[in-house]
Amino acid sequence: MCIFCFEGTPRELVDRLVDTNQDWFKRHFTEVLIHSEDLAVPEWSFVANRQQYKARFFLQALEDHAYLSNHALGVVDLDLFVPDLNFIFGSAQFGGNAIVALPRLRQSFYGLPNDDTIFFQRTVKEVFHELGHVMGLRHCTNYCVMQFSNSLADTDHKPDTYCKDCIRRLE
Ligand SMILES: [Zn+2]
Ligand SMILES: [Zn+2]
């Protein structure tokens, strides 16, 4: 699997994500590498009246790089949305690629003091959740990272691991 940072994404966060979860990545993907160059923010993705970016353009940009690896994970420090939803923390295609958006995982987005630990935990959960979809998992009602997050409270409540049922499905 290859991780792509879109322009403006803090690379130290992505490095830390891979460093601290090497075993997990190796267990579920043959190898994980971080693409050395930032990807450009896709043209036309910005919607001025919402001050947000359309997620599908970012997934398309990942598809253009899919030849580099069987799966691609994009990390973007911009607020994304899809039609019908006010915002998304992430989006994934079953068996394909995934994208995770960082801004709403930060305490400062809600007017609170920033907390790196909480921000990192949320990032890990969103990444493992979207990669679960990439590996074919659907939403799960157990105490599991595959629980659907409607809000940040949901994300904070769920664990950063898969439940036994989901692990069985993965294996
Ligand atoms: Zn999901
Ligand atoms: Zn589960």
Image: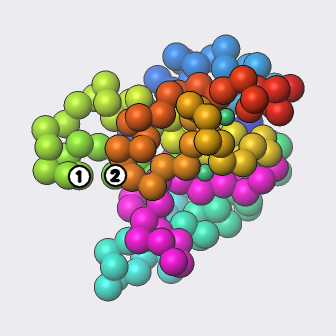
Taking the spot 75% from the left edge, 43% from the top edge, the residue there is 137
Question: Relative to residue 167, is residue 92 depicted above or below?
Answer: below
Taking the spot 59% from the left edge, 56% from the top edge, the residue there is 91
* Badge 1 vs badge 2, beta-carbon distance below 8 Å: yes
> Disc 1 on helix, strand or loop?
helix
Is 113 part of what is drawn in magenta? Answer: no
> Disc 2 on helix, strand or loop?
helix
**Relative to 5, 132 lies left or right:** right
Residue 101 at x, y percent in the picture: 46, 52
Question: Which residue, given by chain and number where applicable, does mark 1 sit on?
Answer: 109
Amino acid residing under circle 1: Phe
Q: Nearer the viewer, residue 161 or 19?
A: 161
**Relative to 135, 158 lies left or right:** left
**Residue 104 bears which disc, if any?**
2
Amino acid residing under circle 2: Arg
Which quadrant, please, contains the C terminus? top right
Question: Relative to residue 90, is residue 42 depicted above or below?
Answer: below
Which quadrant, please, contains the N terminus? top right
Is 79 part of what is drawn in magenta? Answer: yes
Is tag 1's residue or tag 2's residue first in the polypeptide sequence? 2
Label 2: few (<14), some (14–19) or many (≥20) C-alpha neighbours in 10 Å = many
Question: Relative to residue 85, is residue 48 depicted above or below?
Answer: below
Residue 54 at x, y percent in the picture: 50, 72
Taking the spot 52% from the left edge, 16% from the top edge, the residue there is 20
Taking the spot 54% from the left edge, 66% from the top edge, the residue there is 55
